[in-house]
Image: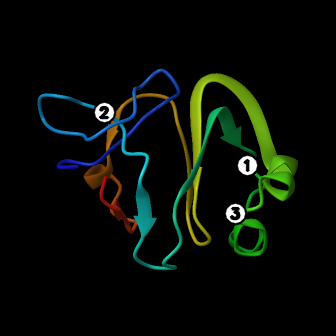
Amino acid sequence: CCPVYLGGSSSPYGIGTNISKRTCDQLRCTACDFRVSLFNDYIWDQSCDYLFFRNNVPELSKLRAKMIKKKGARAYACQCSWRSIDELTDLQTDQQLRWVCGKH
């Protein structure tokens, strides 16, 4: 993917390009070396913190405790970072995230 896009649940998955703006579903974090989990139609609760994700990723049954249903959104998380996204977003606009395409 180049550029790498994040997006809400209405954004299609695939290899992202400038022409075909698709969200990457093969994200990997270069900081914690975990695959990024994503959940359609959910956002993260505001009370989420680093320790919650560190202790619970990638266990969906444990992560559900802090997930809020929101149609059109997509919740992303690795063990050290998390985001709730509603619309197509270029990953480069968020300098704090250390996520890259893990290859398709």
Residue tagged by mark 1? 46
Q: Regarding mark 3 in the picture, which secondary structure is present there?
A: loop
Which label's residue is closer to the chain start, 2 or 1?
2
Q: Mark 3 or mark 1, which is nearer to you?
A: 3
Left or right placement of residue 90 versus residue 79 in this view: left
Q: CA distance from mark 3 to mark 1?
A: 19 Å
Q: CA distance from mark 2 to mark 3?
A: 23 Å
Left or right placement of residue 84 versus residue 19 in this view: right
Q: Residue at x 31, y 52 (%)?
A: 104
As displayed, is residue 58 above or below residue 21? below
Q: Residue at x 39, y 34 (%)?
A: 13
Q: Regarding mark 1 in the picture, which secondary structure is present there?
A: loop
As displayed, is residue 29 above or below residue 43? below
Which label's residue is closer to the chain start, 3 or 1?
1
Rate crowding at label 1 as few (under 14), some (14 to 19) or many (20 or more) other CA atoms within 10 Å: few
Residue tagged by mark 3? 58
Q: Which amino acid, mark 1?
A: Gln
Left or right placement of residue 86 versus residue 1 in this view: right
61 vs 82, nearest the viewer: 61
Q: Residue furthest bottom?
A: 32
Q: Residue at x 35, y 62 (%)?
A: 102
Q: Position of residue 55 (x, y in %)?
A: 78, 74
As displayed, is residue 70 above or below residue 27? above
Question: Residue 62's quadrant in the figure?
Answer: bottom right
Which label's residue is closer to the chain start, 2 or 3?
2
Question: Residue 96's quadrant in the figure?
Answer: bottom left
Residue tagged by mark 2? 22
Q: Position of residue 16 (x, y in %)?
A: 24, 40
